[in-house]
Image (cartoon, grey):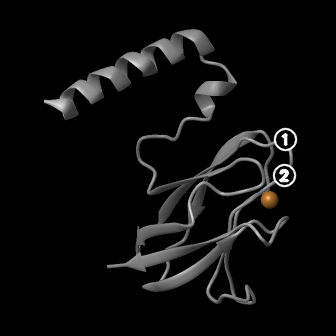
Amino acid sequence: MTTRRSAVTLLALAAILAACSGGGAAASLMPPPDVDATVTARNTAFDVTSLTVKAGRPLKLFFRNLDGVPHNVAIYADPSASQKVFVGETIADSAKTYDVPPIAPGEYLFRCDVHPAMTGKIIAGR
Ligand SMILES: [Cu+2]
């Protein structure tokens, strides 16, 4: 069972990483188990360009910024980013779980407000 072996390997890796980090800052960069989506910023780019989430209920968006320069995740209802839906706190070298209010079904833009070229798409479905 390849899947089971992978899971065991991951668990072993996680245990080793936890032991090495000593529960310091590295541990807080791990997403909590209950998040709906995770976005990571590194080298002034997001690691994902598309997120699929559930519409109509509060969302937990885990944002991890591995850069020393500040980034955030902001959500807009339109591609020109004129209709603000949610603006996440700007952070650097850290991580944060954003509490995003329920959004209607549809497609949204997400971007870093500090670097508007950092963009992606959120698809909210039922
Ligand atoms: Cu940025």
Q: CA distance from mark 1 to mark 2?
A: 7 Å
Left or right side of 63 for 118: right
Q: In the orientation shown, which residue stands out farthest toward the front?
A: 2
**Vertical relation: 50 (above or below) 35:** below
Under mark 1, the amino acid is Gly
Quadrant showing the C terminus: bottom left
Three-letter amino acid code of the residue under disc 2 = Pro
Task: Specify whether tag 2 is near ligand 1 (CB below 8 Å).
Answer: yes
In the rendered image, the vertical position of residue 74 relative to residue 23, given as above or below: below
Depth check: give the residue in front, 120 or 77.
120
For residue 104, the mark is none
- Identify which residue, 34 or 40, lies in the foreground: 40
Q: Secondary structure at mark 1?
A: loop
Q: Which residue is mark 2?
A: 70
x and y percent of residue 52 in the render? 43, 69
Q: Residue furthest left?
A: 1
* 69 to the left or right of 22: right
Q: Residue at x 61, y 15 (%)?
A: 21
Q: Which residue is mark 1?
A: 68
Indicate the position of residue 5 as horizontal and vertical percent values.
23, 24
Residue 56 appears in the figure: no
